[in-house]
Amino acid sequence: MAEENKNTVEETEEVIEPTAEAEAEVTEEAAETAEAEETAAEAVEGEVEENETFQRKPKKSKEEEKIEELTDRLQRQMAEFDNFRKRTEREKAAMYDMGASAVVEKMLAVVDNFERGLKGADEADPFVDGMNKIYKQMTTVLGDLGVTPIEAEGKEFDPNLHNAVMHEDNPDVGENIVVMELQKGYMYKESVVRHSMVKVAN
């Protein structure tokens, strides 16, 4: 009889132990479930706060939208006007340079005549001295306006600056070298007004 009671107690202990472990697992699962529910609640609360914040932002009125639209149109028109002003200034400058080039080209004939007249004249003659002073004054004024003579003699032939009208075989000079300037060429600022008329060595 004592042995039967002993066996019954052992069986009871074996049954009790698994029940304690099961309770521990249940407790742990409950804790995890509670933590998950708390996290979900915090997330929901955050979303609610964001929605409330979004809803609290005031919507733009029609007047404000109209003001923004008109401001944008005004800025665009101002930018277009600024571009138009700059383009007009460039066109005016180009037209001025074209007109000035035409005037300079006509004045070069007068300069050529001064040079021809003074070439063999007697410098001791007071009249020649007066003409020479006028010629120097004219070239100075042209220089102030941006008119400069093109260097030619002794330089390598450049079709952008020189106009070759004669050729000669000269072994003492390199090929395509200007050996004589027949008519002086001029530039106005960065554009050629008249090409130099030259003789080139082959």
Image: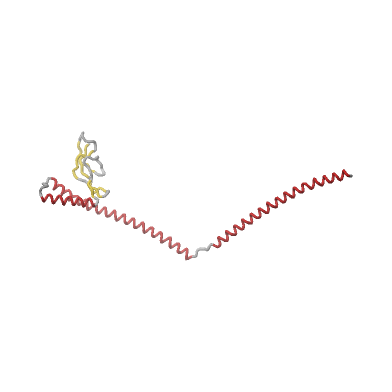
Give the image location of residue 35, x and y in percent: 66, 53
- Give the x, y percent position of residue 109: 18, 50
Q: Position of residue 160 (x, y in %)?
A: 26, 44
At 72% from the left and 51% from the top, the residue drawn is: 27
In front: 171, or 10?
Answer: 10
* Residue displayed at 47% across by 64% down: 64
Is 95 positioned to the left or the right of 45 in the image? left
Residue furthest toward the top?
171
**Image check: 18 left or right of 171?**
right
Q: Quadrant of residue 5?
A: top right
Q: In screen coordinates, is 183 left or right of 57?
A: left
User: Furthest residue to the right?
Assistant: 1
Q: Residue furthest bottom?
A: 63
Depth check, front residue: 180 or 122: 122
Which quadrant holds the N terminus? top right
The count of marks equals 0
Nearer-the-camera pick, 53 or 181: 53
Colour pattern: secondary structure
